[in-house]
Every structure is written in structure tokens, then in C-alpha cells.
Amino acid sequence: MSEIEELERRITAALDRIGRSAEAMGTEVSGADPAEVAELKAELEAEKLASAQLEERNKKMREKYEEARETLEADLERQREATATLDVEMQRMRAANEQLRASNAALREANEQGVGDAHLINKAMLAELEGLRAARAVDKAEVAAIAETIGAVLTGPLPKLEEDV
């Protein structure tokens, strides 16, 4: 981008110098060759046209860049949301697994003492059920994150900034 802007600036400066020279030639030299003046004016118009074309090309490139940037930012935000959801579900699963380990330890302790406590068995079953639910939620969050990534890939490549400008 900066190269185009530099070229644009240089062309504009050159056009200004040519314009001033052409005007000076027309006012200073009354006997100037009209064909040469006409040729210089034609060259000046050609350079102005080239400058306008470069400006339009630069504008189109900026638009494509902005579109690509906005698309990438939206994809990044969706990825962040999916990752955050996955993280929350992973924390939930870790907590459920910790609860399951504690319940199982208490159940083993009760069995070692020969006291079969129905409450501890129920608590262990509930902890195991919560662990399974948390694992399922993690799986769903992972699938959603993967689907989001695949969706971004399947929407096609980003427009190349150098093409068709």
C-alpha cells in the first residue's frame, strides 16, 4: 500500500511540475511550437488519467483489505466464543470429576468399615452422572469449536489483495 501511495505522490508532483512548465512555456514563449504545446498537454492529460486510475486501484485495494479484515475479526470473535465455551465446560467437567473422586473415596472408606451407606452410594451415582453430563457438554463444545473452524475454512479463501484491482 505504501508503495502505491508513494508512486501516487510522485506522479502528482510530476504532473504539477509538467503543468507549471506547460503554463510557463505558453506565457513566456509566445513563439512556442503549438504542436509541442499540444503534445505536452496531451501527455499531461494522459498522466492525469494514469493518476486517477492509480487512485481508483488504491481505493479498491483498501476496500478489499477492509472487507478481509472485518471477516477475519468476525471469525476470530467466533473462535474466541467457542474457546470460552469449551473452557467453561472443561472447568465444569473437572469439578464433576473431583466430586466423583471424593464420593468414591468416601464410598470405599464406608465399605472398608463394613458400613454400606445408601446415601453415599446415591451421592456417588449423582457425581458420576454429573461427570457424564459434563463430559458430554465438553464434547459438544469441542464439536462446536471444530465446526466453527471448518465453517471458516469452507467459506472459501480470503480475496487476494493483488488480484483484479
Image: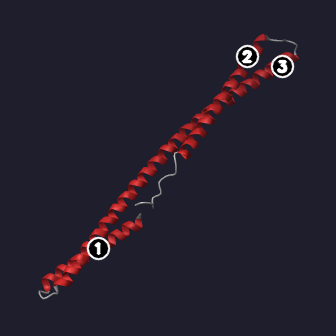
Image coords of residue 3 (percent x, y): 41, 68
In the rendered image, which residue does mark 1 sit on?
13
The answer to whether residue 16 shows anywhere in this view is: no
Nearer the observer, 13 or 143: 143
In the displayed structure, would residue 101 be above or below residue 153? above
Q: Secondary structure at mark 1?
A: helix
In the displayed structure, would residue 17 be above or below residue 74? below
Q: Earlier in the sequence, mark 3 or mark 1?
A: 1
In the rendered image, which residue does mark 3 sit on?
109
Q: Identify the residue at image location x=24%, y=78%.
A: 18
- What amino acid type should be assigned to the residue bearing mark 3? Glu
- What amino acid type should be assigned to the residue bearing mark 1? Ala
Q: Identify the residue at image location x=46%, y=47%.
A: 71
Badge 3 local density, few (<14 within 10 Å), some, or many (20+)?
few
User: Dots 2 and 1: beta carbons under 8 Å?
Assistant: no
Q: Earlier in the sequence, mark 2 or mark 3?
A: 3
Image coords of residue 103 (percent x, y): 76, 21
In the rendered image, which residue does mark 2 sit on?
123
